[in-house]
Amino acid sequence: MKIELVRRARDWQERTAVLDCAGKHSYEELLEAAARVASALRGERSDLEEARVAFLIPPSFDYVAVQWGIWLAGGVAVPLCLSHPEPELRYVLEDTEAEAVIVTPATIDQIGKAGEDSRLLPVSEALEAEPKPLPDVKAARRAQILYTSGTTSRPKGVVSTHANLRAQIRSLVQAWGWSEQDRIPEILPLHHTHGIVNVLCCALWSGATCEMPPRFDPARVWERIASGELTLLMAVPTIYVKLIRFWEEQPPERRDELSKSCRRLRLMVSGSAALPVSVLERWKEISGHVLLERYGMTEIGMALSNPLDGERRPGTVGFPLPGVELRLVDEAGAPIAEDGREGEIEVRGETVFQEYWRRPEETRAAFREGWFRTGDMAVVEDGYWRILGRSSIDIIKTGGYKVSALEIEEVLRTHPGLAECTVVGVEDAEWGERVCCAAVCRSGESVTLDGLREWARERLAVYKVPTRLRLLAELPRNAMGKVIKPDVKKLFEE
């Protein structure tokens, strides 16, 4: 077995790995449970040989046991999003050709007909299997497929190997000073690299404890901060906005107690979306912490980070992380050496993903001479990197998620009341960007925002559903008939 994350757990056997609604679970219990899941998945086979196994499990000890069990069996883990409707789940299952889907009693109905071509395995059954000898899983094998939206209209499966994950974890553990004394709440989505790698995997690699509440609740998070037991907090800007709002609603005495308790944490991190400077400053007033902002994406893990020790400059994402090579290039692909000149970020190193699942042409197009082309623009000033935005207006970052406007448009165009539509992201202090839709109604039809949202929630993940709607007589277009999206954005910004 070459899965170093799992191997290291043997060093922490008696320590608490996970704390969830059911109680405390040790690393020893996690190893045993994962071995049982691996046996249940393999059956009479000795090795899954990179067969894809999906799972729809709320944050819990069971989630981790299943994730590790898939890896121990030689499979590729495909975590599903708890908030996705059946059509989006079906897309992932069909695209990966998942041979099995591990579910709980609470999620089996959510899978519905989407899982009819896969084996549905209750997690309780998987955890009861008799452990058997495990296959040798080398680091070069595929480990995980996470779905992210790019410039195409449908999400792409980002394939990471065990070596990729190992490199990503090592880089963050070194940069952020993780140790077995750490304790962190997992309040981020567990189908997203931020929650999976930055929090869960880094904690378990280090022998730390990961608390896994079933869902994010600002009152509960503040309660855990006040306990004095936490050492780290990692979240997206939207979560910090909600924590600020909760704090402001408390009586003065309680505010003082909560603020004092924040100072016992050693590190607070923000990522997955640009952190508004106003939020950073307000959080500093409340907590005494300057949030550590970093930059990464599903394809590369984390690439840039403000320092653990040293100046954290608002509006920047710091410096390249250990083991990660970065460069800026101009439109022709030539490297940019001087400070203050903007360019596109390109990344190289072991942290970079292996491929887009079964999309060889798109994989080739994503690389230039071995460098991954992020599509994000940045500038370096006094050594600090500052993200300027995305090179494509069709990518929207909202609430920590990166979504494709083209994908959303494709779904909204099937609405019976819409003749045509376009989707843009509009800057927002709480969400980073809000998903906004400009549309033209069919003759004789009338569409409202509430009605559109209700309809869309059955077909799109909640964070992809438009929060604003403008009805127009016609969409602004150029001479080639292409919608002029900057003009659409101005309609919402006015």
Image: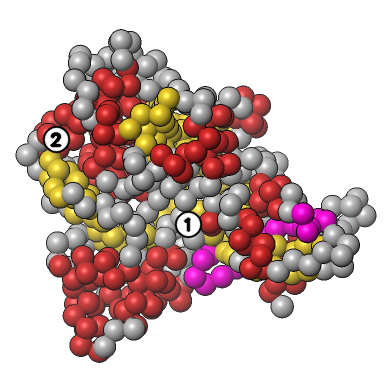
Q: Which residue is mark 1?
A: 400
Q: On the image, which quarter does residue 80 sit in?
A: top left
> Count the marks: how many?
2
Identity, as a three-letter code, of the amino acid under mark 2:
Glu
Queried whether the magenta region covers residue 218, the answer comes back as no
Q: Is residue 325 visible?
A: no
Is the residue 349 above or below the residue 311 in the image? above
Q: Position of residue 431 (x, y in %)?
A: 51, 66
Q: Is residue 151 visible?
A: yes
The Cα atoms of the two marked residues, 1 and 2, are separated by: 32 Å
Q: Position of residue 3 (x, y in %)?
A: 27, 26
Q: Nearer the viewer, residue 71 or 387?
A: 71
Q: Nearer the viewer, residue 217 or 232?
A: 217
Identity, as a three-letter code, of the amino acid under mark 1:
Gly
N-terminal-most mark, 1 or 2: 2
User: Is disc 1 placed on a helix, strand or loop?
Assistant: loop
Q: Which residue is mark 2?
A: 29
Q: Position of residue 459 (x, y in %)?
A: 60, 49
